[in-house]
Image (cartoon, grey):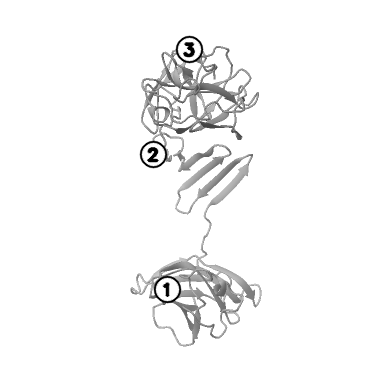
């Protein structure tokens, strides 16, 4: 039985016997990295390899490949090896790569390992004359590792490996779906939607993204409040970040939301109140914040607060002046923003953002407002507005927000002034 052995030293040197030709990626990879392998010394030995018993005696041939790392660097990276074979010796698809760990016969083998066979020339339709094999080598610093390439002249009694990962993907109308039904039996389904990021993260039919008890959301320290409002029952909703409880007031009720369920307001005394929270970031000492929301207005009302806010859907406000924040919708579909920046009446003011119809009726619209020391940027769906209707933002010289302690945070209305949102 022909047995071969190849030793490869990961150091500076020349190719011996031209086993790897000048066009090989082995010679060219990692040239710009000091800690990466140099062009290797490759030595072919014709003597019998006595290191181990056979992994599987169904195979007639094997080649031993020794990788020696001469530097104090652990290696875990691709290795390319060019090999030639005699006629009627290497049957296509019979290639198997094993890692030998030297611990003895019973547990000496790791594999078969993933290996790519490419750059193939053939004697005929079935037998390989030469090829390059690529695999991930795992060699510790200043040590060596042995691999064996097994192959056979036919496929008799050789198990066909299944490399099917069960991976599939699809992109349609801004929605990307990725499905994995792996060999282990675990099933994964991830969905990304344009403008929404991840909307499904499912394992074995359990959606970790939309189930509040399983939701793997990133909740960094900078995040102060996150309400999905998707409980779909009861009279309260919970802030996922701070565990604040919001109470549904008036006729506020559950309905179909953008993702899962949401809360619907009829514009007549309905809102959700979370009480006196979010003094950070909407209070003294706070000079920047971002608020975002999905809204679905169905009717626009003419009733407005003393700050000109109609159809208020988010507020941090209280008597007697309902300071410090109101977000609403104008009668022509723009975003109305009121902010008390705490520097007197000139900074206790409001302005509008967007163009007529930016926020349509009977459709979902994404709103984001970013405040940074008096500078306001607004995102409505996928359009940024960095200046207000007035041309010059009225808070341009402001900094910190005004005192907010005692003001309830509400969704669906501004409390005390009776300015309600319908939708």
Quick one: 206 or 154, which is closer to the camera?
206
Which type of secondary structure does the marked residue at label 2 adopt?
loop
Q: Which residue is mark 2?
A: 221
Query: Where, by quadrant of the figure, is residue 21 drawn?
Result: bottom right
Q: Secondary structure at mark 1?
A: loop
Image check: 217 left or right of 14?
A: left
Front position in the image: 202 or 400: 400
Which residue matches tag 3? 418
Q: What secondary structure is found at the residue carrying circle 3? A: loop
Task: Name above or below for residue 310 compared with residue 52.
Answer: above
How many labels were placed on the picture?
3
Tell me the CA gap for discs 3 and 2: 34 Å
**Neighbourhood count class around disc 3 (C-alpha, 10 Å): few under 14, some 14–19, many 20 upward:** some
Asked if the residue under mark 1 is in contact with the one under mark 3, i.e. CB atoms within 8 Å, the reply is: no
Seen from the viewer's position, the closer of residues 398 and 39 is 398
The residue that disc 1 covers is: 55
User: Crowding at label 2, few (<14), some or many (≥20) Cα neighbours within 10 Å?
Assistant: few
Q: Is residue 94 something that shows in the picture?
A: no
Give the residue at x 49% y 84%.
Answer: 43
| Dot 3 or dot 2, earlier in sequence | 2
Q: Quadrant of residue 99?
A: bottom left
How far apart are the two marked residues, 1 and 2, measured between alpha carbons?
53 Å
Q: For the view shown, which residue lies furthest in the left direction?
A: 103
Taking the image as shown, residue 124 lies to the left or right of residue 206, namely right
Compared with 400, 15 (above or below) is: below
Residue displayed at 42% across by 13% down: 320
Q: CA distance from mark 3 to mark 1?
A: 80 Å
Residue 292 is situated, as x and y percent measured from the top left of the image, at: 50, 31
Q: Nearer the viewer, mark 1 or mark 2?
A: 2
Q: Earlier in the sequence, mark 1 or mark 2?
A: 1
Find out whether the residues at labels 3 and 2 contact each other: C-beta distance under 8 Å: no
Could you tell me residue 85's position as x and y percent? 57, 80
């Amino acid at each position: 039985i022909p047995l071969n052995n190849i030793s490869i030293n990961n150091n500076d040197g020349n190719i011996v016997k031209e086993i790897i030709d000048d066009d090989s990626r082995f010679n060219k990879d990692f040239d710009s990295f000091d800690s990466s392998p140099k062009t290797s010394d490759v030595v072919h030995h014709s003597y019998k390899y006595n290191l181990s018993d056979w992994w599987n005696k169904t195979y007639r041939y094997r080649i031993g490949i020794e990788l020696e790392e001469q530097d104090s660097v652990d290696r875990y990276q691709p290795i390319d090896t060019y090999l030639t074979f005699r006629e009627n010796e290497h049957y296509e698809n019979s290639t198997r790569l094993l890692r030998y760990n030297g611990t003895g016969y019973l547990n000496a083998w790791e594999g078969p390992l993933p290996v790519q066979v490419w750059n193939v020339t053939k004697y005929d339709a079935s037998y390989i004359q030469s090829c390059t094999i690529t695999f991930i080598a795992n060699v510790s610093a200043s040590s060596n590792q042995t691999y064996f390439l097994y192959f056979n002249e036919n496929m008799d009694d050789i198990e066909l490996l299944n490399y099917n990962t069960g991976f599939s993907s699809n992109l349609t109308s801004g929605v990307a779906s990725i499905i994995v039904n792996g060999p282990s039996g675990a099933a994964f389904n991830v969905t990304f939607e344009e403008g929404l990021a991840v909307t499904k993260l499912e394992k074995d039919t359990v959606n970790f993204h939309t189930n509040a008890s399983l939701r793997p959301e990133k909740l960094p320290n900078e995040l102060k409040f996150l309400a999905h409002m998707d409980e779909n029952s009861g009279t309260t909703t919970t802030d996922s970040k701070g565990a604040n409880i919001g109470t549904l007031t008036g006729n506020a009720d559950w309905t179909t939301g953008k993702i899962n369920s949401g809360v619907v307001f009829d514009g007549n005394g309905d809102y959700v109140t979370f009480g006196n929270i979010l003094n950070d970031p909407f209070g003294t000492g706070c000079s920047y914040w971002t608020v975002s929301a999905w809204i679905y207005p169905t009717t626009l009302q003419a009733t407005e607060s003393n700050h000109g806010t109609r159809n208020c859907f988010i507020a941090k406000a209280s008597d007697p002046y309902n300071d410090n924040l109101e977000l609403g919708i104008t009668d022509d579909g723009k975003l109305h923003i009121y902010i008390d920046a705490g520097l007197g009446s000139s900074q206790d003011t409001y302005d509008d953002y967007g163009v007529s119809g930016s926020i349509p009726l009977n459709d979902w619209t994404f709103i984001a407002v970013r405040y940074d020391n008096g500078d306001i940027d607004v995102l409505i769906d996928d359009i940024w507005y960095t200046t207000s209707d007035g041309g010059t933002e009225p808070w341009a010289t402001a900094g910190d927000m005004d005192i907010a302690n005692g003001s309830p945070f509400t969704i669906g209305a501004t409390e005390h002034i009776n300015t309600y949102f319908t939708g």
